[in-house]
Image: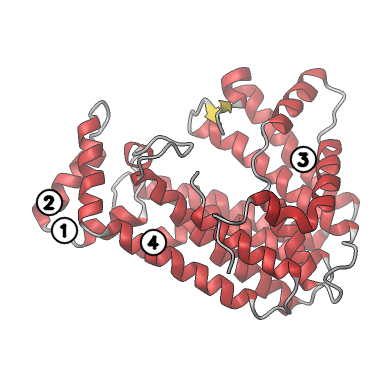
Amino acid sequence: MPQLSSVSLDQIQAPIAAEMDEFEHKFRQSMRTNVLLLDKIMGYIVKRKGKQIRPMFVFFSARIALPDAAGPLPEATFRGATLIELLHTATLVHDDVVDESNYRRGFFSINALWKNKIAVLVGDYLLSRGLQLALAHDDFDLLKIVNNAVRELSEGELLQIEKARKLDITEDVYFEIIRQKTASLIASCTAVGAASAGADKETVERARLFGEKVGMAFQIKDDLFDYGTAEIGKPVGIDIKEKKMTLPLIYALQRAGWLEKRRMIFNVKNNEGHRERVQQVIEFVKQSGGLDYAIATMKKYRDEALAILHTFPDSASRTSLEQLINYTIEREK
């Protein structure tokens, strides 16, 4: 199977390059507005877009669900990808307000430049444009899939906030949080792709479960970055500083003695202004095998995703999805 070292994201995207270009145009059109301030902000959002991995999952999933995997994609697939990207962008804008974050992907966040009131309204606008796009074409099946993901994302965020107060998250609760917060959105991408191509319910559910497994692996990889040393797009130890209980730390605490566990929880709860306490937690997790356990769990979800993917007919798009899965767990940021 191709590895990240030999396959770049541009190479993975190559089979759907034309579709991605067309999507980019349609996505920009979906954000057009006559309100000058809003149009300026929409332009800023488009310029700082990320890797576009979610639309890629939509298009590749549509292709593997089509009887003719190399045939033209229906317009519903482009609308589905645009719908997801609009709603996802809205949640990111709102997240930055909730987290009081001034940066997103190395750029100033909307709330940092235009303040919270405008950022909240911008997020609401993006949500409304997504809803309008789906309703204008009677894409109720796609809207149902994406709406469920947004609901779960909100529930996952609130569950994490609730549990962060006591730092009493078990592995089961952690998996539920990341399933809702991250995996549900990637699952909606793969489900929307299959549904937009006219797949039956069983195929759509298979595609959804595939995306969910990928999303679980993706989030565990993101959690592992907290213990790295390279420049990865977020500061090392940021999850610990924000009192987020991730899998490596949960595993380490479960296997610690009472006194050590109490000391580490104290360090997590009272780390503000104490970089040495964050570093102590990082070293504790590394020495306890927390990273090895998280890596093994991430690979388990990767393997489960591949097993589901291989129930679909062999095609260039299926190969690209295999490469995209490897990219998500081998990426360096």
- For label 1, the SS is loop
> Tell me, what colour scheme is on the image?
secondary structure
Q: CA distance from mark 3 to mark 1?
A: 48 Å
Q: Which residue was labeled with disc 4?
A: 295
Crowding at mark 2 (Cα within 10 Å: few <14, some 14-19, many 20+): few
Q: Nearer the viewer, mark 3 or mark 1?
A: 1
Label 3 element class = helix
Which disc number belongs to residue 256?
1
- Residue 260, numbered circle: 2
Q: Is residue 147 left or right of residue 294?
A: right
The amino acid beneath tag 3 is Ser
Please state, as top left, top right, bottom left or bottom right, where the N terminus lies in the image: bottom right
Under circle 4, the secondary element is: helix
- Position in image of residue 185 (x %, y %): 62, 55
Contact flag, marks 4 and 2 (Cβ < 8 Å): no
Residue furthest toward the front? 6
Residue at position x 83%, y 45% from top? 21
**Badge 3 vs badge 4, beta-carbon distance below 8 Å:** no
Residue at left 68%, top 63%? 320
Type of the residue with mark 1: Ala
Mark 1 vs 2: CB contact within 8 A: yes
